[in-house]
Structures are given as structure tokens and as C-alpha cells.
Amino acid sequence: MLTNSIARINFSSKWLLIPLIVLMALTLGIGLLYAEKWTILIFFVVFVVVSIFAEPFIGALFYLICLYARPMEIIPAVKGMPIMKYLAIGTLGIWLLRIIVSKKRDLVKAPQNYLMIAFILVMAISMRTYVTGIVDVLTGDFFKIIIIYFLLINLVNTEKRLYITIWIIILSTLWLSIHSILLSRGIVIGDIELSQGTRVTSSGIFGDPNDLAQAIVVAVPFVFNLLFHERFMLKKIALAVIGATMLFAFLLTGSRGGFIGLSVVVFLLIRKKAGIIVGAVLSVAALLGLLVFAPGYMVQRLETASPYDDTGAARIEIWYEGWQMFMSNPILGVGMHNFAENESTGHVAHNSFVHVAAELGLPGLFIWMGLLYFSFRSLNEARKQYSVEVIASKAHVLSDSLIVSMVGFLTTSFFLSRQYEYLPYILIALSIVVYQVAGKDKGLKPALSMIELRNVLFITLAFFVVWFGILKVFL
């Protein structure tokens, strides 16, 4: 079969590699002379297709790069093309074809898989259209999220691949940071612009300063944990430069919710090395030192951050309207993507948990909490397994980083509505990967027990208590 034949080709052989490079170089050179745009496009397509046929994991990496770097918004030859859709469907199709050919059915099993399917059903039911609702969900943006989720949990199946994937996220976030820093200096790449005339943004799903800040908060734990554990000085210097670039770009976003998330991340990173009390003191000192390099608008926004200022009071009002939506439709919610239509000022909830509860009702919030709960449980079980090993592996370091990263995401999500975006599901998928890598040949098995579901229910009800308490205190 074609896939097996390509997979068996030794691309590292000099007898194949040198002629192939020469042929590709000549073809590319001649093409650029006569049809630059089409040559670049065709060369890119052929390179990607051959790479994915050789290894579908490469397709998942290409997808992550496109998700962050957005070449279809920057490179003229592919501008406006639905590259991510083609990558997702193509990689999925080739992966499924390889499964059929190899007759291996060892798909990764995890509680989150069942919850993802249940989440789709709740989304569809919330629209009150049932069958057509499912079609709408599966043909919308969430369909691509589902694909990348299942590709990641099945294709990132070794410690080496996990390490590569994390580095793709780090370098992609570095690109977002450089992209935004250039924007702040008047150098515009692609169709991006400053928010409110000062706050930096990037492209695609990171076109809002708060989304960009959240992406950086998620990446920071990986960068600094790898920095702490790296032995080679050059790598340490490279990671330090990457971290400094990300933090500087973060300050340019002027995100107050992001700063709260970063504060939690910094504390968790330092606390592990210095303890709670010393860690808290050092965290405050580090954050104050960081603000020395912050632009004036970032400091001003932090100084005026309060539940009683205009923005804070407006957010509390929106959360109150979300509470009313939930109480009027506690089972089905007001419907997916209908929060803004039911909110008096046309805003989203600015809180992922409130947003899910209002739009998808109690079942939707229960499933959302379940996805997060089982992800943390997977990471905790993996960490326990790694703790008995004499030498900490890269996966051990990455599992610790992922826990902090998810906490940072959840903290920022308390001020952002990002429940239907890529980032949480990438983190959820990686938590399964870490668990699978740790559990290979060690007897770890995922479970979806009644006790665990009871715990999820308690956490869900606890959120309602917190939500109601915030409204009682500040309204």
C-alpha cells in the first residue's frame, strides 16, 4: 500500500536525499522564475502531503503551527485559503487510512473522550434543533477542535513526541510575542492592529489582547520549568531569552485578567522551589520587578482594577444577567452562542464558567467541569508515577509544567469566555498524553467511576455557590 511504501522509505539515505534535494531545488528555482505564487503554493502542498503520508504526527504539528502563526493571513500565496481545514481533514484521513491498513485498533481511551462526545450532544440539544444542531456543531469551528483533540491524544504517543509538541507551542508563542512587539514598534505583519490604540494583539484567535496574554500565560510554565531543569548553558540562555520576550510582550497586552493569571503561575513556579511563604514574597518581588518594564497603560489599568470601577462593575452586572439566564433555563440553557443575544448590552460573559452555565445549562457546566477535573486527575496520577522514578524524565518536567499551565488558563478563564476555543482542549489533550506516556507498561488505567463523577458534581455545585456569593457581595 502507498502509505506503507512511503513509511518504509529511508529519507535520511544520502543516495536518496542528495538527488531529491537537488531535484527539488531546481524545480523550485525554475518555478519561482515563471510562476512565483503557484510555485510556492504547490511546493508547500506537496511538502506537507508527503510529510503527513510519511508520519501523520507531522500533520498535527503543522496544524498547531498554523493555529498560532497563521501563515494564511501573512503569506500572499496562501492568503485566505482554509489551510487549517485541509490540514485537519487530511491528517485525520491519512491517520485513519494507516489504522485500517495496519489493522491496529489501539485508540487511546480516556474519560475525557466520553465527556467530549457528551459536550457535543449538549451543545446540539441547547440549540433546540437536535439533529440539525449536531450538524451545526460538527460543521462549525468546534469540529476542528474535536479533530485536533483526537489527533493529539493518539499521535503524541511517546515522550519524545510530547517534548516536540511542547516545543512547537513554545516557539509558536514566541512568534506571537515577537509579532506583537513588532506591532508596538509600528512594524505590522499581516492584518493586525493595536487595540484601544495602545494594547498589542496578534493574528487569528489571538487577535484580542486578552487572548494573547492568556496564550503567553499558558506557555510560560513550560519555558521556565525547562529553564530550571536544563543543564546546558546555551539552552538555558535560549530559554531565558524566550521567556523574557514572552513576558515583555505580555506587558504590552495590558491584560488585567492575564496579570492575575500570570501572578498565580509565577507563585506556583517559585513555591515549588522556595515553599509557600518565601514563594509568596519572592513572587510579589518578581511581579513588581516585572512592572518596572511595563508600559504606562498597563500600570494604569492595574491601578484601576476593582470590582467597583466601570469595567469591574460592568462585568459583575454581566455575570448577574448570566445568572438570570441560567435560572430561567437551568437544564438546556439559552443555547450555544446565544449569551450575547440575551445580554442587555450584547456582551459575552467574560467568564468561561458563567458562559457555559448560561448557554448550556447544568449538564453543560457539569461536563465542562468534568473535562477539567479528569485532566487534573490524569496529571496528578502521572506525577505520582514519575515521583517513584530515580531520574526525572522530560515528561516528568512537562507534567509539572502542564499542571501550572492549566491553573493559569483557568485563572484567566475566570475573566474571559474561551470555552469553545482551541487552547483548553489542547491542554486537556496533552494531559491525556502525559498520563498515557507515564502509564505505559505501568498498569495505569483511565476510569470514569461514579465516585469521580460525584466529585465533579460537588465541584460544579461549589462554583454556583461562589458565583452566587460574588453577586451577593458586589451587587
Image (cartoon, rainbow, N blue to C red):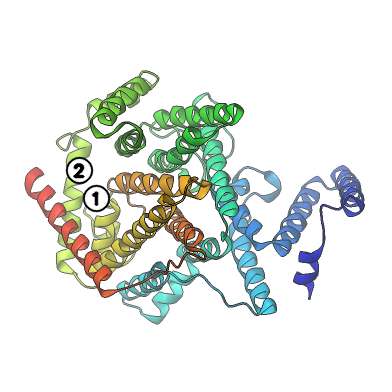
* Image marks 2 and 1: residues in contact by CB distance under 8 Å: yes
Q: Disc 2 residue type? A: Ala
Q: Quadrant of residue 459?
A: bottom left
Could you tell me which quadrant the N terminus lies in? bottom right
**Percent position (x, y) of residue 180?**
50, 33
Q: Judging from the image, what secondary structure is the residue with disc 2 in?
A: helix
- Horizontal side of 141 relative to 115 (left or right) equals right
Q: Quadrant of residue 361?
A: bottom left
Q: Which residue is mark 2?
A: 314
**Percent position (x, y) of residue 438?**
48, 58
Q: Quadrant of residue 214?
A: top left
Q: Earlier in the sequence, mark 2 or mark 1?
A: 2
Seen from the viewer's position, the closer of residues 43 and 133 is: 43
**Percent position (x, y) of residue 186?**
54, 25
Q: Residue at x 76, y 55 (%)?
A: 47
**Percent position (x, y) of residue 394?**
52, 46
Rendered position, 398 above or below 237: below
Seen from the viewer's position, the closer of residues 359 and 362 is: 362
The residue furthest top is 292
Determine which of the numbered discs, if any, sits on residue 44 in the image.
none
Seen from the viewer's position, the closer of residues 4 and 391 is: 391
- Horizontal side of 401 relative to 83 (left or right) equals left
The answer to whether residue 333 is seen in the rendering is: no
Rendered position, 175 above or below 150: above
- Horizontal side of 315 relative to 216 (left or right) equals left
Q: Which residue is mark 1?
A: 345
Q: Disc 1 residue type? A: Thr
Report, in whole angstroms, how far the alpha carbon at label 2 lies from the one at label 1: 10 Å
Other-residue count near label 2 (Cα within 10 Å), few / some / many at <14 / 14–19 / ≥20? some
The residue furthest front is 390
